[in-house]
Image (tube, rainbow, N blue to C red):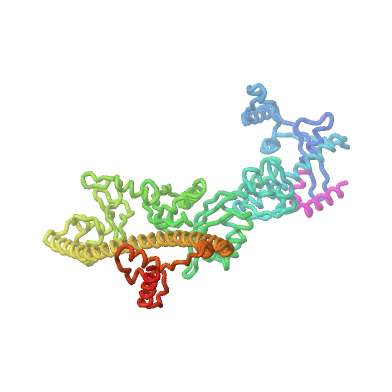
Amino acid sequence: MSREIVEAIKGLEQEKGIDADTLMAALEDALLSAYKKTPGAAKYARVDLDRDTADFRVFELILPPELEEKLMAQAISEQEQEIDPETGEMREPEEPELDPELIAPYEDQITTRDVTPDDFGRIAAQTAKQVILQRIREAERHMMFEEYQDRVGELITGIIQQSDNRYTLVQLRERVEALLPRSEQVWNERYDHGMRVKAVITEVNAEGKGPGIVVSRRSPELIKELFELEVPEIADDLVEIVGVAREPGYRSKIAVISHADGVDPVGACVGPRGSRVRMVVSELRGEKIDIIPYNDEPARFVAKALSPARVREVLVDDETQEATVIVPDDQLSLAIGREGQNARLAAKLTGWKVDIKSETEFSQEEDELTYEEGEDVDGRCAAVLSAGRRCPNASLQGSRYCGLPQHQALARFDTNQVTVLTGLSDEEISLLADPNADDAQVRPLVERATAQLEQEGATEGEPQEGAADAEEGVEELEEAKEKAETDVAEAEQELQEAEQEAAESVEADEVEKADEAAEGDEAKEEPPAAEAEQAVETESGEEPVEPEEALAEDAATEGEEPSQEAATVGANPSEEPKAAGEDSEGSRSGRA
């Protein structure tokens, strides 16, 4: 029996990796529990187990009454009070059992007696079995805790074993499982049985009955670990990820910085043709990632964090950690993002409160600002840069300008334009910026810079007038061009109408010709009226009278001679007037 126990303990030690001393201690506890289940067992007992032969003896511990009362009072004072969940009242503590560790220091006052039973009953054996199994499970959990307690934040790979609406179990290795709670899962991911998944360890505990390792797929550390896995420069500490802002399943932003000359942090994370960042995006099931270069200047860092939107200007307030970002009007929606996502991620990444405004809105607010007692009410430097925008820095206390010497020197002038200092050297600008400088040295510099600025303004005025005239000429040319285009369009329309009318008239002429041709055919079929009358006169025996003779006769009747024109009317124009006269005379003589 003893030899079989020793062999079983060695087998458990090799199989589960549990120390043999731990198993022997568990066996002692199991034998003690089994002894207390036997009838007539002693109140206090101890089991001595031989580690080599597995022989054991049970000894009863006989305590003096005074020692027992003292130890019992100590145990009661250390006992915690419990509340009844049904009634909500305090429970009376039960009489505690003295822990063997509490009795051990008083062994010299305790007497022992051997009470080893000849055999254990069925209930005692079952109790011993349960105690041994429980001690083995506790030993495994303790080993797991010792292995993983220093691995919090580390990336692990596991296999999905079970998944439901409450949690998902991930097997890390044999007999070690991790819990992926619902709160640490991504909304658009599926966790099917047998699927491999990468996650980050967020918690390791040795209490409770369930798995003592909690992993997460929503943690920002997951992106850091994935990039470290894919980018050798990050693993070698040449490139560092200084910040991560993430909305799981939608979008993430990371800020990277390089600690080595010649190493581009953004290019190292993106990889050749985007191969490195593509692997990370694939592991995150298509989540978009923005890689941003880190900058020590808050204004530049905030501007980069709002990518892919283009930023025109950033105004920072170091005291309140607020940044006002001015963007072009067409970039406002892109800078804010869908439901404010881009602005939220930028604020989370930079640690600054970000207020985004369009250029139109910001210019309206600038026009409404007023100055009181020479101080700018918005706390910004009043210097106007060469690009036409105000300095984004905050003004110093008691001054309208920031700490730059070029801007402090503007206090000597009536203008806030930085261009007034163009013709001055750095030493002269430093002299103007010094409030304690001698006026005799400052006054000539101010007069010279002011005169130079006025001269440049006058020189620039002429080209501006010429440019204005050119613009007016261009406008007139455009108006003339528009008018010509309008006239051409009207002429084309009139031409179309004329062509349409001509086509209609041609059709009408064709119709009339067709009608005349039809009437001519009818006239050819019937004899003319003049021929019919001549035929009637011939039948009556009278000679027909020519038209010329009739005309001459009419003239003789009136006592006048017929004119040559009248004679030729209706006659052949090739006949001579003389012949016509002879005919007339012959007619008169014939009639006489």
Q: Which is more toward the observer, 515 or 502?
A: 515
The location of residue 408, given as percent across then percent down, is: 24, 56
Q: Residue at 69% x, 26% y: name it.
A: 94
Give the left or right position of residue 188, taking residue 325 as reference. right
The location of residue 485, given as percent across then percent down, is: 39, 62
User: What is the residue that sits farthest to the left in this orientation?
Assistant: 440
The location of residue 251, given as percent across then percent down, is: 55, 52
Residue 4 falls within the magenta-colored stretch: yes
Give the left or right position of residue 314, taking residue 384 as reference. right
Give the left or right position of residue 85, taking residue 513 as reference. right
Q: Which is more toward the observer, 359 or 186?
A: 359
Res 289 → quadrant: bottom right
Residue 61 falls within the magenta-colored stretch: no
Q: Residue at 52% x, 48% y: name it.
A: 338
Q: Which is more toward the observer, 92 or 488?
A: 488
> Magenta span covers which residues?
1-27
Question: The C terminus appears in which quarter of the rendering?
Answer: bottom left
Main secondary structure along the magenta-highlighted residues: helix
Res 79 → quadrant: top right
Q: Is residue 546 visible?
A: yes
